[in-house]
Image: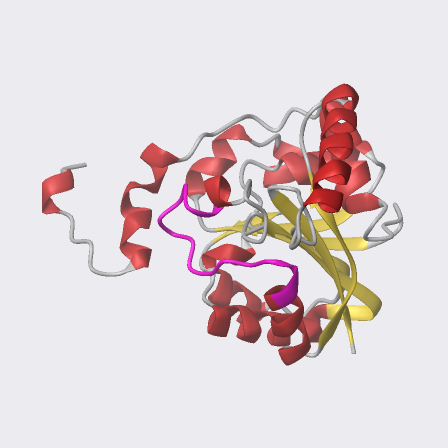
Amino acid sequence: MLILALKFEKLEDFYQVYENHRTYVPAVVRKKHIRNFDEQVWRPGKFESSQSVLELGTGTGLFLAYLVAKGLTDFKGVDSDPKTLEFMPDNIANKVTIGDIWLTLDKLEEKFDRIVMLDVFEHFSYFEGQKLLTNLKNNLNTNGRIILRVPNAASPFGLQYQYNDLTHKAAYGPGNLEHLAFASGFNIENRLSARRGNYFKKSIENLVHSILNRCLTEPPPLWGANMIAVLVPI
């Protein structure tokens, strides 16, 4: 690709070189992935192996591979990057649609129990995000939920994730994400920090955060660099 011939006039143009910025990792589920997804997504989102799941922005399919490991078989995925298929097992790639998310959703008539977006929602502007959530209500079954993971801009540690990617269009903290959810016809049922690392490091962090909460006049509502939000229709 001849970089000098490319034009960069809007945020979407940076997807032209996204392959050089993105890290592609094969969808191999390890114990740490199961532990993290259990803690951050499965339990907060009240998942069951009998449910149907749609993931928007699958990447190389790690979360979908996790669902398979949990015994869940009724799932579909959507991603815009065809190169991700090279890193997916066939049993996952066969259930992933590659294409524009808006065009794909326009044709999607199925309903799901859970819709998941991990590190995806921040790639949409506030107006696009409101439109997306509003449209997705039509693809939710009764008692359905949407689970989001986004950088936590309310935390001093979240800015490294928010501003590490030029294609991020919106910055979210617990407050404005709740605002947008309500504008889209949802309440936030649960929210929590999405933290990486082992038990020892998390325990030290918990201790430090508890001390800071008592020392600071305005501590953040969530300390985690990333946050999980579980949305339920109003």
Q: How many marks?
A: 0
Picture quarter containing residue 67?
top right
Q: Position of residue 176 (x, y in %)?
A: 60, 67
Looking at the rendering, the stretch of residues picked out in magenta corresponds to 162-175
Could you tell whether 55 is left or right of 46 in the image?
left
Q: Is residue 64 above or below residue 10?
A: above
What scheme was used to colour the molecule?
Answer: secondary structure
Image spot of residue 84 (x, y percent): 48, 37
Quarter of the view holding residue 214: top right
Q: Name the main secondary structure of what is drawn in magenta.
A: loop
Query: Percent x, y for residue 8?
Result: 20, 54
Could you say which is closer to the camera, residue 31 or residue 166? 166
Q: Is residue 230 left or right of residue 109?
A: right
Residue 73 in sight: no
Farthest-out residue, left = 4
Above or below 101: residue 128: below
Tell me what residue is drawn at x 66 percent, y 44 percent: 223
Q: Residue at x 81, y 65 (%)?
A: 144
Q: Nearer the viewer, residue 21 or 51?
A: 21
Direction from residue 56 to residue 43 in the image, left or right = right
Q: Quadrant of residue 37?
A: top right
- Residue drawn 49% across the image and 67% down it: 102
Which quarter shows the N terminus?
top left
Q: Position of residue 118 (x, y in %)?
A: 61, 48
Residue 142 lies in the magenta-colored region: no
Vertical comparison of 139 with 82: above or below: below
